Amino acid sequence: MAKKTVGELIREARTGAGLTQEQLAKQIEGVSAGDVSKAERGEKELTQAQLKAIAKATGVTQKSLLEAASGAKKTASSTKKTAAAEKKTAAASTKKTSSTTKKAAATKKTAAKKKAEEITLTAVEKRVLELYRAASAETRKAAEALLKGQKADAGVLETLLGGALDLLTGNK
């Protein structure tokens, strides 16, 4: 059977005594109803004097609350140590991942830079590429045939490419 937390014991003692959090808080110096609520949820540690006052107000033994609080502190200390160790491990892992990510990003940048250096388009080439991408499959075939020097209907291509042939051939 698992030991009950201090918060669970406080809640049981309070409800067993028929008190609300506010009523209990009024009987303990320096404690608000919000503090009682946080203590019951395990979000706030109360002092030994406050725990003794809760025990007195609710009719439970001081020993039960104080022993639970003592155990909770030991567990919290152990939890903090474990969390610190996990944090160090995570930091080391993050550092490795960060390094790997940086290398990958650098490699990607280098590849992109090389690609950008390899292909530099003029304004005319960019326009032809845009027109080609927007063209139908049939128009693309005709444009490829023309550029390869094969026979193609230049009139149809000129109409479909919107005068891009003039740009390519230098005719105005």
Image (tube, rainbow, N blue to C red):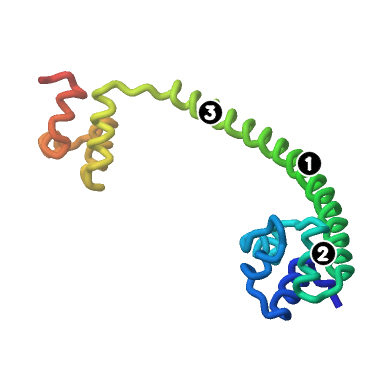
Q: Mark 2 points at which residue?
A: 52
SS for callout 3: helix
Judged by depth in the image, the label closer to the viewer, 1 or 2, is: 2
Give whichever of discs 2 and 3 has the lower sequence position. Answer: 2
Is 26 above or below relative to 168?
A: below
Mark 2–mark 3 distance (CA, rounded to whole Å)? 65 Å
Q: Mark 1 points at which residue?
A: 88
Q: Tell me what residue is drawn at x 18 percent, y 23 percent.
A: 167
Disc tally is 3
Q: Tell me what residue is drawn at x 75 percent, y 71 percent.
A: 57
Amino acid type shown at disc 2: Lys
Q: Closest to the observer: 139 or 76?
A: 76
x%, y% of residue 47?
A: 79, 56
Which quadrant holds residue 93? top right
Q: Mark 3 points at which residue?
A: 109
Amino acid type shown at disc 1: Lys
Give whichever of discs 3 and 1 has the lower sequence position. Answer: 1
Which quadrant holds residue 63? bottom right
